[in-house]
Image (cartoon, rainbow, N blue to C red):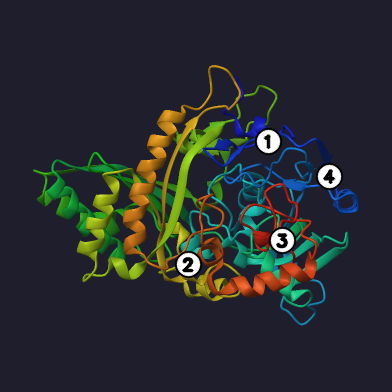
């Protein structure tokens, strides 16, 4: 069990997954066979073999998928772990797009982790690529194909919107290049239509951006002594967010807790800690004016832009990173904070998400939404992930985002609310089994909390990469008006449903083992 909470160790195992299962849904299970792919030709061979013998095919890079879509028993696994080349390009032109102006870009192979991408692009080349906040997440797999959000998505946009080109092995065993000039329908589907659905992406090229002078964070909490004071705090924070933080500079999350604490885990870019402090000054002054009922403890930290993923610099910030503890590993291999490590080997009791429209933060609606958050938090903690909404994002981010296939509800959303419960547990391992009584209780409380949120956000939708396994109206929730077109593209490129996964486009007529359950 020594390495069971080390994400890098788990990723080095063909059967390793970030999560160990989900109550009433799935349990992590190794495939019967695995193809350790080193290039596109290996993936072509695996796809052709699976199609010829009608095998369940599973694709895994880092195994982060919460819904268990990157593992299945009695399956053939395409494991892209060894495909981790990163190539920074000063002037990239997509294939067949001779008239398109060249753009700074980076090409990532299918098994690349965001840590490796960031260290090459930012630390070595002084640029930024929009990826995920968790350094151990795969860059070119389900994260990107489901849309993808990072800490600064308000500035740089949804990760999929930065995709310039993808090479993909389709169900017929062909290697296609998709971009804005060829196979445009497949290119659109790969940017938000869901991982493991339309083919196996072998590599993709992403736009890079100039670095800001600084990245930074504010971390801490605000505690209210009474319920009334906490409701007042929530209302004031919503209005403060709308006025001062709903812009391209701010991201990450706050958590509304049952103990009347508002926990702050927010980040910023493009300003110094002093400038960020000035943004927060009026809110701190309001807290100070109400110090009889409110207490705020929070620290600001800034990091030079080119040192953001530099392990030699970050190790001097207490608690910032956790290095891979294995003695034979590179010293620059790390994951962030305790929170990222806490999700390793998680057995999920429940996980639900919901977009939150920015109009709920307006003066006329803030009191009611503050009451909603308070009521929901009586059941379970409620996290608002502000980087996972595009309301308030930069003009460029929103323009590029409109070109992808995610649910358009994201552009009205200030944040994605996530309410989840998990334990570090291992089904089938004596002494480490999940506590089902605890799990059922937590599941019920999470459901009660999200029921309050759903009633306040009709039609808001959910995020396909971080959502409820049991979502009933998943087509509309995940893709909204885009689902019909995505279904057509699925039928064109994969008419027999070789690429099957739970609640993925086109999965309506197929059982969980990948076999047909209806006439198509």
What's the CA distance linking mark 1 and mark 3?
36 Å
Q: Quarter of the image holding residue 331? A: top right
Answer left or right for 2 relative to 164.
left
- Residue 435 % position (x, y): 46, 27
- Residue 171 % position (x, y): 83, 60
Label 4 packing within 10 angstroms: few (<14), some (14-19), many (20+): many
Label 3 packing within 10 angstroms: few (<14), some (14-19), many (20+): few
| Residue linked to disc 1 | 11
Answer left or right for 518 relative to 427.
right
- Identify the residue at image location x=61%, y=41%: 136
| Quadrant in the picture for the N terminus | top right
Q: Quarter of the image holding residue 443? A: top left
Answer left or right for 386 relative to 399.
left
Q: Which mark is residue 518?
A: 3
Q: Is residue 25 above or below residue 246?
A: above
Sequence-wise, the earlier of marks 3 and 2 is 2
Whether residue 435 is visible? yes
Q: Which mark is residue 410?
A: 2
- Identify the residue at image location x=85%, y=50%: 54
Label 2 packing within 10 angstroms: few (<14), some (14-19), many (20+): many
Whether residue 250 is visible? no
Q: Quarter of the image holding residue 247? A: bottom left
What's the CA distance linking mark 4 and mark 3?
33 Å
What's the CA distance linking mark 2 and mark 1?
31 Å
């Amino acid at each position: 069990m020594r390495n069971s909470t080390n994400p890098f160790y788990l990723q080095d195992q063909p059967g390793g997954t970030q999560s160990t299962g989900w109550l009433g849904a799935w349990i992590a299970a190794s495939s019967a066979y695995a193809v350790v792919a080193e290039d596109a030709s290996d993936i072509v061979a695996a796809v052709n073999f699976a199609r010829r013998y009608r095998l369940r095919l599973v694709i895994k890079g880092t195994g982060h998928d919460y819904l268990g879509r990157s593992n299945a028993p009695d399956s053939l696994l395409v494991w892209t772990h060894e495909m981790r080349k990163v190539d920074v390009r000063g002037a990239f032109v997509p294939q067949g797009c001779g008239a398109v102006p060249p753009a700074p870009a980076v090409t990532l192979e299918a098994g690349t982790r965001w840590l490796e991408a960031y260290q090459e692009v930012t630390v070595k080349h002084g640029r930024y690529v929009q990826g995920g906040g968790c350094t151990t997440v795969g860059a070119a797999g389900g994260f990107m194909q489901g849309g993808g959000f990072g800490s600064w998505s308000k500035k740089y946009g949804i990760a999929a919107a930065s995709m310039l080109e993808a090479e993909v092995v389709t169900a017929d065993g062909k290697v296609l290049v998709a971009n804005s000039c060829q196979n445009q329908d497949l290119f659109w589907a790969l940017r938000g239509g869901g991982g493991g659905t339309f083919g196996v992406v072998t590599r993709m090229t992403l736009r890079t951006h100039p670095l800001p002078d600084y990245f930074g964070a504010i971390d801490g909490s605000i505690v209210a002594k009474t319920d009334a004071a906490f409701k007042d705090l929530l209302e004031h924070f919503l209005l403060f967010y709308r006025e001062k933080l709903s812009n391209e500079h701010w991201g990450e999350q706050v958590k509304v807790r049952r103990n009347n604490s508002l926990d702050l885990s927010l980040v910023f870019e493009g300003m110094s800690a002093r400038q960020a402090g000035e943004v927060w000054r009026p809110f701190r002054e309001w807290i100070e004016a109400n110090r009889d009922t409110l207490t705020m403890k929070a620290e600001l930290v800034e990091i030079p832009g080119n040192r953001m993923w530099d392990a030699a610099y970050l190790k001097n910030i207490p608690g910032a990173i956790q290095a891979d503890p294995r003695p034979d590993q590179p010293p620059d291999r790390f994951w962030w904070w305790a929170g990222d490590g806490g999700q390793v080997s998680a057995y999920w009791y429940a996980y639900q998400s919901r977009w939150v429209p920015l109009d709920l933060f307006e003066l006329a609606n803030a009191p009611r939404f503050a009451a909603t958050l308070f009521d929901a938090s009586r059941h379970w903690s409620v996290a608002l992930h502000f980087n996972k909404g595009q309301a308030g994002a930069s003009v460029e981010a929103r323009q590029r985002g409109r070109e992808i296939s995610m649910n358009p509800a994201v552009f009205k959303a200030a944040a994605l609310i996530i309410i989840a419960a998990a334990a570090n547990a291992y089904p089938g391992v004596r002494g480490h089994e999940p506590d089902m009584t605890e799990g059922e209780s937590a599941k019920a409380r999470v459901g009660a909390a999200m029921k309050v949120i759903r009633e306040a956000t009709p039609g808001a939708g959910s995020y396909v990469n971080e959502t409820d396994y049991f979502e009933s109206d998943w087509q509309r929730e995940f893709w909204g008006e885009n689902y019909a077109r995505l279904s057509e593209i699925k039928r064109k490129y994969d008419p027999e449903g070789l690429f099957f996964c739970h609640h993925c486009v086109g999965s309506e007529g197929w059982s969980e083992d990948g076999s047909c359950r209806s006439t198509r």
